[in-house]
Amino acid sequence: MNQNSAPRNRDGIEQEQFLTILSREEALARFESALFPRPVAHEHRPLADALGRALTEDATAPIDVPPFDRSNVDGFAVRAADLAGASEAAPVRLKLNDEVIACGVAPARPVLSGTATTIATGGPLPRGADAVVMVEHTQPAGARAIEVRRAASPGQFVSYAGSDIARGEAVLRAGSTIGSREIGMLAACGIARVPVARRPRVAVISTGDELVQPGASLRPAAIYDSNGAIVAAAINENGGEAVFYGAVADDERALEAAMRKALAESDMLALSGGTSKGAGDVSHRIVNRLGKPGIVAHGVALKPGKPLCLAVCDGKPVVILPGFPTSAMFTFHDMIVPVLRRMAGLPPRTDAKVSATVPVRIASELGRTEFVMVSLVGGADGLIAYPTSKGSGAITSFAQADGFLRIDALADQMPAGTHAEVTLFTPHVRVPDLVIVGSHCTGLDLVTAPLARAGLSVRSIAVGSLGGLAAAKRGECDLAPIHLFDDKTETYNTPFLSGGLELVPGYRRMQGIVFRKGDARFEGLSAEEAVRAALADPACIMVNRNQGAGTRILIDRLLGGARPDGYFNQPRSHNAVAAAVAQHRADWGMTIAPVAQAAGLGFIPFAEEHYDFALVTARRDRPAVQAFLQSLASDESRTALTEAGFRPA
């Protein structure tokens, strides 16, 4: 089982339970104890192929660097004693020797007392010379002579042989990671091949009947295999050599054959899916047949990542990651990367960390160490960390977050206002130029596109209209997109503003009833008539929206207290409503016209919704805010919104 599919339970088959749930620390200790100590496999590689590898032996310089005394400037090689009394008032005249020493030219004539030899930067110092004077400090004195008006000291502008690297010196120690600077040092010593740790060959298998490889057509009830690509990339990032063996269906015999082949040809096997307790999850049942000692941990007190399975089969690690993408990547980075890097001879991964304030309460599950992905924005007193709570099945949660914070297993929450340490996914974080927190809409992307092209970074965090207003009041964003209807005044948005906020009109989007084209129960009717027809048919199933959504308020008005079949199916987005109808899981619902059009569904207009922006007045003059306001009012954005089915205000 993989990725966005849930654990399966086939009829008539009792679900297996996890083995004893272990703490993160105990599971990792068991895994490492079964694998180490072990020698690091090594090989000799050409210097050009050693980038990112760990050196397995000390690298010793076979020569001096530089290999000879050389000039650091363009000028003249001289004897310092000849210039002991030189000054502006008493210049010293030196006769020029009849050779010029350029880089790569071995000197042929010595520098005798009273003479000098023209020399270029990097040129070898000739016999007899012990200093170099810059050409700027001399004057021509006839055809073959110069005058020097400054004294020189022995060694002036000279780099002596071995002054950078001495013959026999340890240039790099075993265990060093070879980067571009290290390659430069080794090349300067003339070293062409180096002993490095061999990249562990890691076989990657995705499991699940539902998987389709990217690029192929997506059949009904299938999903694209994202885990295979992301796990392979993470392996390559951390010193391994990933080999993707494809996706294998939930057939125990076929999967065992694929696992045996992959493990025989590799140093490590990583699978995603099939480690939970569903009847279709067979990966972990196969592992104990692949070698001793077998499974060392199955079920770890992590969130996300509880179904993680760790095994060692005849000295080779076998890892079965959870199927959901976010769970898979968190457990991989937290539990597998340390082992993989150790096998590759690399030092432990060092992650950059920053301190940030968490603006909202985060509930947690007692007994499980929880990792919460966050997006970072700038606040009045430092960084603000917003949880990105799309769930462990959302690949974008991991890809779009800046980092994560950790909630201890003994805590049941992280209170609002907590100052927490955030581990970054990248070495540096760029605070966005424009922060938008509130209700998201596809039309918003059209307005912010010109800002991105202008080099401005925009962070949009979807927390709903009320959440956006709260963030704006706390000064955590520049703009809060809202679409809130006030029953008392029967107007949108303005009644919900408070001091320090002002309304920026955005655009209008038509809400209406969505249905499959050709459904006679809805064709040609008004919204009110369509709902009455749906209520009159017990077989007609609706799809609702979540409480607090502006769309939900409109639906409840139309239903007038009725609770038809499907009322409590309450997804949180317009797209989810359209998908439910298009896929025949529901017959009708309410969404916006652009979403209905994109899904190829029938649409009955009902009410035009105002999608506006609550602007933090104190931030109006910020360049990025001005750029947004200009884009919102521009002909380009208004045309794009109109073409997408919106109506600019």
Image (cartoon, grey):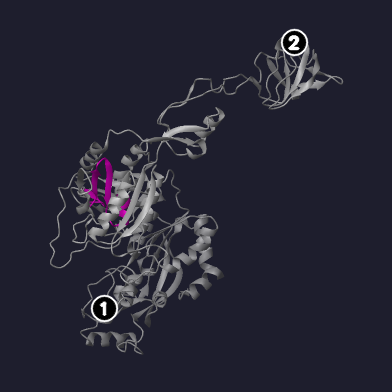
Q: Secondary structure at mark 1?
A: strand
Which of these two is toward me, 632 or 293? 293
- Using residue 148 as the reference point, say whether residue 639 is left or right of it: left
Q: Hey, what amino acid is under mark 1?
A: Met
Q: CA distance from mark 2 to mark 1?
A: 101 Å
Give the residue displayed 27% in from the left and 55% down from the top. 257
- Residue 600 is at least partly visible in this image: yes
Q: Secondary structure at mark 2?
A: helix
Q: Hey, what amino acid is under mark 2?
A: Asp
> Sequence-wise, which precedes: disc 2 or disc 1?
2
**Quarter that holds the N terminus:** bottom left
Q: Quadrant of residue 37?
A: top left
Which of these two is toward me, 202 or 415? 202
Q: Quadrant of residue 636?
A: bottom right
Which of these two is toward me, 82 or 128? 128
Residue 435 placed where, x, y %?
43, 56
Residue 283 placed where, x, y %?
23, 54
Residue at the disc numbered 1: 542
Q: Residues within 10 Å of mark 1 (few under 14, many from 20)?
A: many
**How many marks on residues?**
2
- Using residue 455 as the reference point, say whether residue 390 is left or right of it: left
Residue at the disc numbered 2: 82
- What's the magenta region? 301-330
Residue 348 placed where, x, y %?
35, 37
- Residue 621 is at least partly visible in this image: no
